[in-house]
């Protein structure tokens, strides 16, 4: 580990420089700055106290640097804005003048003072108290070392949908190794299930399969499908991951994807890819364009595993690639960065009893309708009812499970657009009437509003109102044998009954059912809506609170393909930036355990939110991994033996600060 | 075309009266589609809420009095808008500010409650006369349970059967209970929803003071409306009790074998979930447990039960308002009872009892269907 070069000054005697900022009128408009400067001059060990309009500016910083050099200052206090804003600025400035950055302290006399009151007297008194606190505290500051660790240039990407694929290709094309782990037998995610994509009506498979093929053949991408991450340890730049590669019972090195085994297999099960609308074999690839094009055997439906019979696939395989003895394999990899791109689950509308999903066969979800439209789907791309006949009318209901306090409060962002898309596909493939039951039309993206207008020309009927129910109880001849959508047309102000043959429910996108486990494993958090939380909703959408772990795509929140690809690129860029830098600096204000005092009670181990504390069995003490420690202070407060010190936040420093404020 | 200008002062008055949920409504119209009124007549509910949002409600229009407070819309509303609170606020504007006319029969019931503490206008001294010869004690300090029957169950002969059946059961199970004396007044739940807020406050205070003096901790009720107000509304006035409806208590007594039903009842029974126990409180299973443990009884479910149950039309003071024949919610519900071929309709609410009894007579089905409270059926089987 490289040691940062630290300039040492003889700091036996603190020589403190205090600088009070005006911040234009932000501070000076309320705080009597000259009075605070006079006050500061009178404090113990203060060698110089100055004021300036904008301390963070170049002249402001130069003032500090010149004073350090000429007056031999060894401590600097700046009373200005929030440290979140300019602590790095000033730390950098003092460092350039040869002083250790941790011998610098900020007093926030703006957000905590001038911006909280209009009373000049009170503000000035508080500013003096805050400056006094900072000056007293800084006595006890120690010059701390910032450590550097190298960054492993390999990257782990979890999830092989469009987000994972995009990120993988960008990092791999930049010349670095990527491990892409996908739990299904093939990459492609939900996007490969779609028929056409809005607003361009590109065929989803046509635009995605080239990328999938690139991933499959890229020299820098190690693709692990039918695999899941089991364990993660380590820290940014230095993660260790254990990945379980589930047994496919097919030897990937021998299989050439000819498909004879699939043809000959006599055993069937519901196709997960077609959402149970069709069947697949016990040995199967989920869809024709699968990458890798290697079938897997599903133990739950294979006659050999269930009853010890058959083995037809083995008999017919010319390459002898079937291996019933194959075991799961656990591999360990070292990576520097992780991108989570695990996607979403579709909402199951069964609990919305009044919409009849599960009761009426011709009520389907949006994703099921995609499969129906898709040419390699359960109906060969024909839009038909369950009995095979063509529908004469279809209703599309928006906001099923979204924007609803009873299910998901949020808007799923893509449903208005895919509802329009379905209208178009229905009009293209059938002569059916199309009705859209909407509350709002959310067509916000590039080309989206134009797409909405295009649909108007195609003759779709829009009814504004959230339907109360879908029923088969007819009240007249016209309604017999139909599904009737009942609701208020809020623009007409009357209840409407619309008899149709088929109902498509625009279901919500929700967090994956195992999102909690993924979050725990990678030490990231979920929001109230169960999606993973980004570091900042506007300014940092792909980073998480855990350094080195990024999120991209729908696992962060519902979004369309353009936004997913943009996020995936963003995550890839962040990873490449770290790889390019080659090293990371570790925060110096971390906690450290005095092993003489540690009683081995282990209370701290479980409290640490970053899993940074290990218990050393042999020595019966706990030890903090400095690289993982974020300096939150929880263990410091909890230790019953007072064995843990928090660097830069020691008891003496805190007590001195309190004394400064009170006295 | 008519031009409308929003009137903020009116909106403010509605908000002050407890109509705040109107701010959440995003006008999706689901409520209008769900509301059972729209199967019979017209009730433009969503539009009324929007008029409340803009402060342009026509307080002389009947629609202000239409809502029965059944919560069918609230259950499914994507914004969780509590519509009955908005309706209550609108009605308060009429009752307190005089912006419209109070329906005649409601006005009478309100005056009765205000003057003599019960909607029927009967003398308060006779409140406990129904129990005169039953040999039961008045609640005193230290009695375990206070049995508080609904005003109808104390004064109205058909409903009194329920109170008497309840007493039978409590005696058989050797429960330590007492009835209130003549000083208690109507629980006030429905008249509050009809807009008479200060009357409700007065009624509640009277009851709370009496209960406090007697040290009441546990109250047994036979009306889901009393249940709702004692459990959910009285605590806002500082009074907390353990409230239990007879159907919950019966289910317990049967499970603990404190009463034993041995006689066979050869009836085909269906159960109507009351709004105040069902959607309001989530209590659905106990009634079915009770009915299924009565020997010989054949239990059938109607369409639209539990949280989808159709209101009988009696909540929120509608019991005291006129509805024309052919425009009554109880008739809609009775059609469903006939559909499943039941000969007995089991209920657990005095308002349901009144509405369905009226409906059976006006639909000429008295020979075919009888309406019975759960307590009555249980007593028949003891």
Image: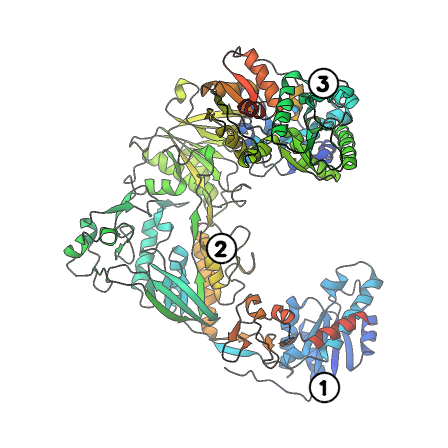
Q: Chain of mark 3?
A: B
Q: Which residue is mark 2?
A: A556
Q: Is residue B357 left or right of residue A361?
A: right
SS for dot 1: helix
Q: Identify the secondary structure beneath mark 3.
A: loop
In the rendered image, which residue does mark 3 sit on?
A: B120
Question: Which numbered marker is on residue A642?
Answer: none
The chain containing the residue under callout 2 comes to A
Is the Cβ of the residue at disc 2 closer than 8 Å to that at disc 3? Answer: no
For this rendering, which residue is in front, A297 or A482?
A297
Q: Position of residue A136 (x, y in %)?
A: 76, 77
- Residue B345 picture location, percent across and down: 52, 21
Q: Nearer the viewer, mark 1 or mark 2?
A: 2
Tell me, yes or no, whether the two marked residues, 3 and 1, touch with CB atoms within 8 Å: no
Q: Which residue is mark 1?
A: A70
Residue B309 in sight in this render? yes
């Amino acid at each position: 580990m490289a040691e940062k070069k630290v300039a040492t000054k003889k700091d036996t005697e603190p020589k403190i420089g205090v600088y009070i900022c005006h911040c234009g009128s932000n501070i000076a408009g309320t705080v009597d700055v000259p009075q605070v400067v006079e006050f500061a001059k009178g404090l113990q060990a203060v060698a110089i106290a100055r004021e300036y309009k904008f301390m963070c500016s170049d002249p402001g910083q130069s003032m500090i640097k010149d004073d350090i050099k000429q007056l031999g200052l060894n401590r600097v206090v700046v009373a200005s804005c929030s440290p979140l804003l300019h602590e790095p600025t000033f730390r950098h400035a003092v460092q350039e003048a040869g002083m250790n950055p941790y011998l610098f302290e900020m007093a926030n006399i703006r957000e905590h003072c001038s911006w909280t009151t209009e009373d000049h007297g009170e503000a000035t008194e508080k500013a003096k108290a805050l400056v006094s606190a900072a000056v007293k505290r800084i006595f006890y500051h120690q010059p701390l070392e910032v450590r550097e660790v190298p960054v492993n240039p390999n990257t782990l990407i979890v999830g092989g949908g469009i987000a994972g694929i995009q990120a993988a290709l960008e990092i791999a094309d930049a010349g670095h190794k990527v491990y892409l782990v996908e739990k299904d037998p093939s990459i492609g995610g939900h996007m490969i299930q779609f028929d056409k994509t809005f607003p361009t009506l590109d065929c989803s498979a046509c635009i995605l399969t080239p990328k999938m093929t690139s991933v499959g053949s890229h020299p820098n991408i190690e693709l692990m499908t039918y695999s899941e991450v089991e364990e993660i340890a380590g820290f940014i730049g230095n993660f260790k991951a254990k990945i379980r590669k589930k047994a496919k019972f097919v030897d990937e090195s021998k299989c050439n994807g000819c498909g004879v085994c699939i043809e000959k297999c006599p055993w069937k099960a519901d196709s997960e890819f077609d959402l149970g609308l069709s069947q697949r074999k016990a040995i199967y690839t989920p869809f024709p364009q699968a990458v890798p094009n290697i079938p897997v055997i599903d133990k739950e439906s294979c006659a050999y595993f269930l009853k010890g019979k058959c083995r037809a696939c083995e008999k017919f395989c010319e390459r002898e690639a079937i291996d019933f003895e194959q075991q799961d394999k656990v591999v360990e990899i070292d990576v520097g960065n992780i991108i989570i791109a695990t996607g979403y689950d579709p909402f199951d509308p069964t609990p919305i009893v009044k919409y009849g999903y599960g009761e009426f066969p011709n009520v389907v979800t949006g994703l099921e309708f995609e499969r129906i439209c898709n040419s390699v789907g359960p109906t060969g791309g024909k839009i038909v009812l369950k009995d095979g006949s063509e529908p004469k009318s279809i209703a599309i209901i928006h906001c099923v499970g979204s924007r609803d306090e009873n299910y998901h409060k949020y808007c799923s962002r893509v449903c208005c657009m895919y509802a329009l898309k379905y209208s178009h596909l229905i009009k293209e493939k059938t002569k059916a009437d199309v009705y859209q039951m909407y509350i709002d039309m959310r067509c916000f993206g590039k080309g989206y509003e134009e797409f909405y207008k295009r649909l108007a020309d195609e003759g779709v009927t829009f009814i504004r109102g959230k339907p109360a129910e879908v029923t088969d109880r007819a009240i007249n001849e016209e309604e017999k044998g139909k599904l009737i959508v009942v609701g208020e047309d809020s623009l007409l102000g009357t209840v409407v009954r619309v008899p149709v043959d088929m109902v498509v429910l625009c279901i919500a996108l929700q967090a994956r059912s195992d999102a909690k486990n993924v979050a725990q494993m990678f030490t990231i958090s979920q929001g109230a809506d169960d999606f993973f939380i980004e570091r900042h909703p506007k300014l940092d959408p792909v980073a998480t609170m855990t350094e080195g772990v990024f999120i991209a795509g729908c696992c962060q929140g519902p979004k369309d393909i353009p936004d997913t690809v943009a996020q995936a690129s963003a995550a890839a860029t962040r990873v490449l930036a770290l790889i390019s830098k080659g090293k990371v600096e570790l925060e110096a204000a971390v906690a450290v355990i005095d092993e003489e005092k540690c009683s081995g009670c282990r209370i701290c181990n479980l409290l640490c939110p970053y899993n940074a504390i290990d218990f050393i069995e042999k020595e019966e003490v706990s030890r903090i991994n400095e690289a993982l420690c974020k300096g939150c202070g929880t263990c410091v407060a909890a230790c019953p033996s007072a064995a843990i010190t928090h660097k830069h936040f020691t008891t003496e420093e805190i007590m001195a600060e309190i004394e400064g404020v009170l006295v | 075309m008519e031009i409308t200008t929003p009137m903020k002062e009116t909106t403010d008055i509605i908000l002050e009266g407890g109509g705040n949920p109107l701010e959440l409504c995003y006008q999706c119209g689901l409520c209008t589609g769900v509301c059972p009124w729209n199967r019979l007549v017209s009730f433009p509910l969503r539009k009324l809420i929007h008029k409340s949002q803009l402060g342009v409600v026509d307080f002389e229009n009947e629609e202000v009095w239409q809502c029965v407070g059944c919560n069918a819309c609230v259950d499914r509303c994507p914004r969780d808008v509590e519509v009955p609170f908005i309706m209550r606020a609108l009605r308060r504007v009429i009752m307190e500010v005089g912006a419209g006319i109070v329906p005649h029969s409601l006005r009478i019931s309100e005056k009765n409650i205000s003057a003599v503490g019960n909607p029927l206008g009967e003398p308060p001294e006779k409140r406990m006369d129904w129990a005169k010869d039953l040999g039961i004690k008045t609640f005193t300090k230290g009695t375990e349970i206070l049995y508080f029957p609904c005003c109808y169950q104390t004064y109205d002969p058909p409903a009194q059967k329920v109170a008497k059946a309840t007493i039978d059961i409590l005696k058989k199970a050797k429960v330590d209970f007492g009835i209130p004396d003549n000083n208690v007044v109507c629980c006030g739940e429905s008249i509050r929803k009809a807009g008479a807020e200060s009357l409700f406050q007065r009624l509640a205070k009277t009851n709370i003071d009496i209960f406090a003096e007697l040290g009441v901790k546990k109250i047994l009720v036979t009306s889901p409306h009393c249940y709702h107000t004692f459990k959910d509304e009285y605590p806002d006035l500082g009074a907390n009790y353990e409230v239990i409806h007879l159907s919950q208590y019966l289910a317990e007594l049967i499970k603990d074998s404190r009463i034993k039903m041995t006689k066979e009842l050869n009836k085909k029974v269906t159960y109507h979930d009351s709004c105040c126990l069902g959607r309001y409180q989530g209590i659905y299973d106990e009634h079915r447990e009770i009915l299924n443990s009565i020997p010989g009884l054949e239990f059938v479910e109607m369409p639209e039960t539990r949280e989808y149950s159709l209101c009988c039309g009696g909540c929120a003071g509608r019991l005291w308002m006129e509805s024309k024949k052919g425009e009554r919610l109880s008739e809609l519900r009775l059609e469903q009872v006939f559909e499943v071929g039941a000969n007995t309709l089991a209920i657990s609410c005095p308002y349901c009892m009144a509405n369905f009894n009226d409906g059976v007579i006006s639909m000429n089905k008295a020979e075919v269907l009888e309406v019975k409270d759960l307590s009555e059926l249980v007593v028949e089987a003891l």
